[in-house]
Image: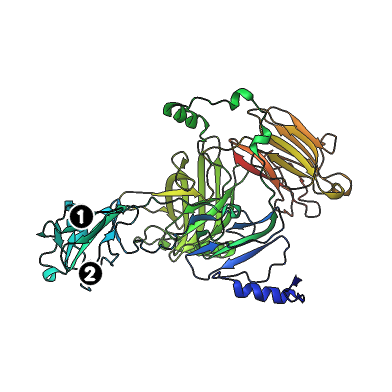
Amino acid sequence: LEQASDGSSRSAADVEELLRERCTSICESARPHPWLPTAQRLEVPGATAIELSIARVDLAEGYGLRITCDEEGLIPVLATPAPTPPAKGQITKYLALGDYLYASLDNVDPNSVSVGTQQQHLALPDGWEIAPSEPVVVAEVIAKHPWGTHVVVCANGNAYSTTLHELGRRAGQLFNSNRLSVQRGNPNKYKPAANQFRILIRRARPRPIGASPLVVEDLGPNDRVLVAGSAVYVHGPVLLPPRWDKRVMESVDVEAEKPQPQPSVEEEQQEEAEVALPPVLCPGPWKWVLSPTHGVTVMLQQGGDIKFLKTTVGMLTEEELREIRELMAVLGESAGDPNAGWIRPDHFRLAKASGSWDAARQRLNLRLDGADDLGTASLEFNSTGEPRRDQVGVTIAGDVVHTRWGFQTMEHDGRRAQTGTVASIWSWPETHEPSLAVELVEGPRGQDLRLRVLNLRSKSEGGDTVRCLFLEAGEWVEEVHGDRALAGGRLRLQVRTNRGRELCWPPGPVPESAESRFVLKAPAGCEVVGLTAGTPSPVAPAAATPAQGSSGGGSSSGGRTTPELSLRPL
């Protein structure tokens, strides 16, 4: 209930209606928020991108929201700052050529055919200059556009004809000189020294800002961001206490507080090179870009397997694919079409995604099996280089082989493979804070035992810390052993670092032969930073690798799940 100004109380429905009246968002969730941890879909159907802004978040202190691309909360939203509306007097009509944007000083559409003139002295907008009369400017910017006038003036006073002057017969030719009038002051103001003239200005083209994971807490009131796609999921309320203050974690050093000499440029560059993280293969998610509009998203699993997440191409069931394969087998080689070419993603329907990865060798293999209009088809990606960092994350290049009907590899102009790219949809850090400590945290009544790895940016998530181990320099969590055989279904966890140090709760070793035991190990190049719930499996695996977990693991007993590791690149 909310207390109204007249002293009466308003119902939840009244408050909701009041909020709806004040709402300025383009879209809203499908149902009122119950103020319990949940995920709600926010969608503009058919949109290629949506703009998000958060004017205000009214939550209890220490709580916030999380926005992801998927309902499970695995894939972070990548967002770019939205362009701010132009202020009065700013340039909004321009054309781009090379490294510059070109406009008229009085902000007229470059393609306007309504003849006019700049009538007043005007100051240059911030960041703009009067364009020089360089040959490329005259030939490409002035001679090919009308600019809503007959003649355009450049920085040296030279005036050149546009496509409107004499029906375009003089376009790009020098019409006159000394046609720039300057009114001295602070700032200077400019005007053409003739009628039916305008002044050409330019500015450097703004550098693109790469997308980065959206963090709601970093947005100010009414900050706007652009998100690709037509929908996002809003998770919350989630517990987000204030971050630790790094100064509290450090001892006070009187000598260190004294002014220190500034490092040279060479020393700074050397320091950056020492702490920079080389990009490596890590769990992901990763997106195999099939075309500008189609892709397949996967996670790299422990043990070197691939987990399919989602795709934008059409889908087939494995039963439908089996029927198509049987038909192809009956037709034999006659099923082949000699005019067939590369497999088009917009015609391809996916039945199965598989593959493997090797963290040590930095190699990735992905395979898509399905069909298109000509029969069975498969696409296989094999990486050919090492992962590299770009503006938005990490990419790895490779060759993509197209195979039809299970036996014929497509080729074109002598090429038997196309170039392909698999890109991370998470931002790769230049550096990261090292892990400082590992805790085993227990919930109320001894339930819900959790693993928590802390660094300087960690946020407390509640619970009672029952065991804690401070990590040394160069030490990280490498293995997690578990046992669900305790009374009441309680979980015992045993954590082991790369230096052999261990942490266990409740006390006692994890039995080697227990059917409910599981063992999880981080792949090379990664450290353990937590545990997730995992996916139930109705049948226990016949044999398991240490990275996948030992037999049982809770998967064959009452539908229990084996946790999965949360990983971070070293």
User: Residue 226: horizontal and vertical position, in percent?
Assistant: 49, 60
Find disc 1 in the rendering and name its residue.
Answer: 137
**Which quadrant is the N terminus positioned in?**
bottom right
Secondary structure type for disc 2? loop
Q: Residue at x 65, y 75 (%)?
A: 18
Q: Quadrant of residue 222?
A: bottom right
Disc 1 marks a residue whose amino acid type is Val
Residue at point 57%, 25% (across, down): 258
Q: Nearer the viewer, residue 407 or 63?
A: 63
In this view, the residue in front, 488 or 202, is 202
Relative side of 40 to 463, left or right:
left
191 over 515 or under it: above or below: below
Left or right, residue 345 beside residue 542: left
> Can you identify the residue that label 2 sits on?
148
Q: Nearer the viewer, residue 439 or 304?
A: 439
**Residues under labels 2 and 1: Cα distance?**
17 Å
Determine if residue 104 is in view: no
